[in-house]
Image (cartoon, rainbow, N blue to C red):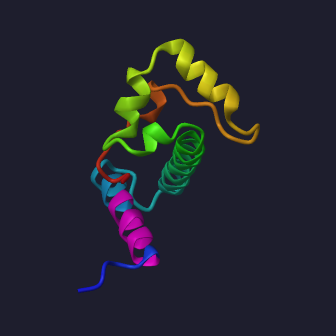
Amino acid sequence: MNPPSYQQQTRDLIDGLKAVCASNGLGNDGNEYKIIVQTFLYKLLCDKFAYELKRACPALAGVDDWIVGWQALPEEAQQDLQDMLPAETPRLTADQLRTPTKLIT
């Protein structure tokens, strides 16, 4: 059995977001589009931050939950790592990395 393709995973994510919007009264509303776009933008920013952070600190790449590893670092070490990231990388705090739902994987 082959794993689902990236396109299928994206469609499933959109369908899940649409279901959440519909169950909360936002189905077929202009705000539904905004919610989906903002969710994908949030995921993109978090993924970019994670990718660059793991490149700068390979120890974080080796742990099961890199967010927990990031939160466990002293604030000074977090700041030093962020200073090492490329300029185009978003700067996110540990609180901004929490995923609000299981839809984002």
What residue lies at 55% left-to-right and 54% top-to-bottom? 37
Corner quadrant of residue 78? top right
Q: Is residue 81 above or below residue 35?
A: above
What residue lies at 45% left-to-right and 38% top-to-bottom? 59
Quadrant for the N terminus in the image: bottom left
Task: Locate residue 72, reporting x and y percent.
Answer: 38, 22
Secondary structure mainly formed by the magenta segment: helix
Q: Is residue 7 above or below residue 73?
A: below
Residue 38 shown in magenta: no
Task: Locate residue 39, reporting x and y percent.
Answer: 49, 49
Residue 8 shown in magenta: yes
Which of 60 and 39 lies nearest the eye of the viewer?
60
Which of 15 and 90 lies nearest the eye of the viewer?
90
Residue sitting farthest toward the right: 87
Q: How many numbered marks are there?
A: 0
Corner quadrant of residue 55? top right
Residue sitting farthest toward the left: 1
Q: Is residue 46 above or below residue 105?
A: above
The boundaries of the magenta stretch are 7-17
Residue sitting farthest toward the bottom: 1
Task: Locate residue 105, reporting x and y percent.
Answer: 36, 54
Residue 70 placement, left or right of 68: right
Residue 77 placement, left or right of 103: right
What residue lies at 45% left-to-right and 34% top-to-bottom? 97
Q: Is residue 102 above or below residue 16?
A: above
What residue lies at 68% left-to-right and 40% top-to-bottom? 89
Which of 100 and 46 lies nearest the eye of the viewer?
46
